[in-house]
Image (cartoon, rainbow, N blue to C red):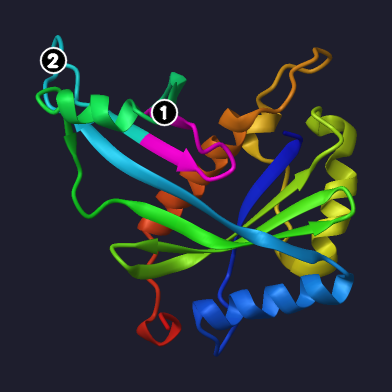
Amino acid sequence: MGVTCVCPVPVAEGKSVQQTVDILHKKLEQLGAVKQGSFCVDCETYQSTGNTGGQPSKLLYVMHNSEVPLSCMALFEGGPCLTADANFDVLMVKLKSHFQNAKGHKVECRGSRYRYCDFLIKVGAVTMSSSARGISVEVEYCPCVVPGDCWNLMREFMQSFLGNNVPELPTVFAAKPEGLFAPADCVDTMTQYLELFNKLRKLQIPASNVR
């Protein structure tokens, strides 16, 4: 896995979520990107049922990514994060006396994968309870694992189809120690998706855009 950036894309004025996704697909195809299947990222939210020593209950996010189908990520609110195999979902059922599933809070991002030279691009519609919440774009520069070495190149590429919606360097990379070899990994990608999902949960989408 290379350096990956995940960012939201606003719904185009007068367009629906799906229409805006289709516009992004067309831009990528005009650049010469080739469609290579589909992808899915999802997130289930659990809340700890007991509080220890008067501490407030914490949230646990269990996430799956179709790029790593045999693994899942468990991210605690405020850290830490662990990588487990796909059977972790079964364990969460057995831990229901400690972690309660927050019904109606499952978020999914589904869409198409595109390949352009050394870039892998994923454009997805984000849904929550079957309702469209927004659009995500994931861009991975495959040959590099050090964000500082390729960020300018990634920005330039993203600008070619995102225009003014190109994000700043993700905070998960900005927090990495300078001067040390701290390669990007799958946890960085899922952390970005979690930040995006939490923002979109709070966002109100006009009914005219949910088509």
Residue count near mark 2 (Cα–Cα under 10 Å), binned few <14, some 14–19, many ≥20: few
Q: Which residue is located at x 60 percent, y 38 percent? A: 189
Q: Is the magenta stretch mostly helix, strand or loop?
A: strand
Residue flagged by tag 1: what amino acid is it?
Leu
Numbered disc 1: secondary structure:
strand
Relative image position of residue 27 (x, y in whole percent):
78, 75
Left or right side of 37 for 73: left
Left or right side of 192 for 153: right
Task: Residue under label 1, please give it.
Answer: 75
Highlighted magenta segment, given as a residue range = 62-76
Residue flagged by tag 2: what amino acid is it?
Gly
Distance CA(mark 2)–CA(mark 1): 22 Å
Left or right side of 89 for 164: right
Residue 191 bears which disc, if any?
none
Task: Residue under label 2, please give it.
Answer: 54
Q: Which residue is located at x 40 percent, y 28 percent? A: 74
Numbered disc 2: secondary structure:
loop
Residue count near mark 1 (Cα–Cα under 10 Å), binned few <14, some 14–19, many ≥20: many
Relative image position of residue 55 (x, y in whole percent):
19, 17
